[in-house]
Amino acid sequence: MSLPLSISGLTVRAGARALLTIEELALPACSLTCIRGPSGAGKTTALHALAGLLSGTGRLAWGDADLCRMSRMARTRFRGAQMGMVFQDFLLFEELTARENALISAVFRPDRAALSRRADALMERLGLSGLAQRRADRLSGGERQRVAVVRALAHDPAILLADEPTASLDRATADALIADLAALARAEGRSVVIASHDPQVWDAMDRVLTIRDGVLEAG
């Protein structure tokens, strides 16, 4: 089940310096949202705050779960249960195969068999079936990105957060990936927030937000 997002008076600091400020933001469940802005504006910081990787003051709630009021351990549990993340630098285990990387989230889950079937179906949909047994360090940048997407979606999260998911892809592959992410999100009921400088990604979203100098504004 997708979750709506509600933010009010959010500030994330490093010492006395404000890294991120969001005065008010509401995103409905099952919405597709993009955060755009120049390099260094704070797109990745915003995603990390939405994931609970950074703590802040104010209110940042996915559904009834206010991350600002949670302990670090509680945020970690919420993230593992409800979120999938695609990082800009992939964070794959180089010595593992594509399929093994995709199944990392299954290690401690009781539904491993179902998760494995879902991962295999996602790999087929994203054109990775023939690369399932190839080590990550032998994959191209675009292939690694798609493996990271499968890993993020394998446990069927309510929320997907993705940092520049098309950055390592050619235009045709990037467009196909965003179309697949959007179609899966709508079919499965998932909230998606993507940080991207790619105008083609902006066009595929329901809403585009702009961040400048760490301040997130409605687009």
Image (cartoon, grey):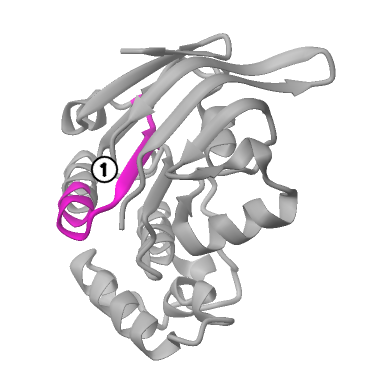
Residue found at x 43% / y 30%:
6
State the residue position of label 1: 170
Q: Is residue 118 above or below residue 148?
A: below
Q: Is residue 85 above or below residue 18?
A: below
Query: In screen coordinates, is 28 left or right of 73?
Result: left
Give how far across and how far down residue 205 sits, in percent. Answer: 21, 32
Q: Which residue is the extreme one toward the front?
A: 64
Give how far across and how far down residue 159 sits, in percent. Answer: 39, 50
What are the residue bounds of the magenta stretch?
182-197
Please tell me whether residue 42 belongs to the stretch shown in magenta: no
- The front one of 86 and 72 is 72
Give how far across and how far down residue 136 sits, in percent. Answer: 50, 69
Q: How many marks?
A: 1
Please tell me whether residue 196 belongs to the stretch shown in magenta: yes
Query: In screen coordinates, is 157 left or right of 75?
Result: left
Residue found at x 61% / y 61%:
77
Q: Secondary structure at mark 1?
A: loop
Q: Quarter-wise, where is residue 108 in the image?
A: bottom right
Q: Tag 1: residue type?
A: Asp
Q: Which residue is the extreme one toward the bottom?
A: 113
Would residue 194 be seen by someone viewing this image from the given angle? yes
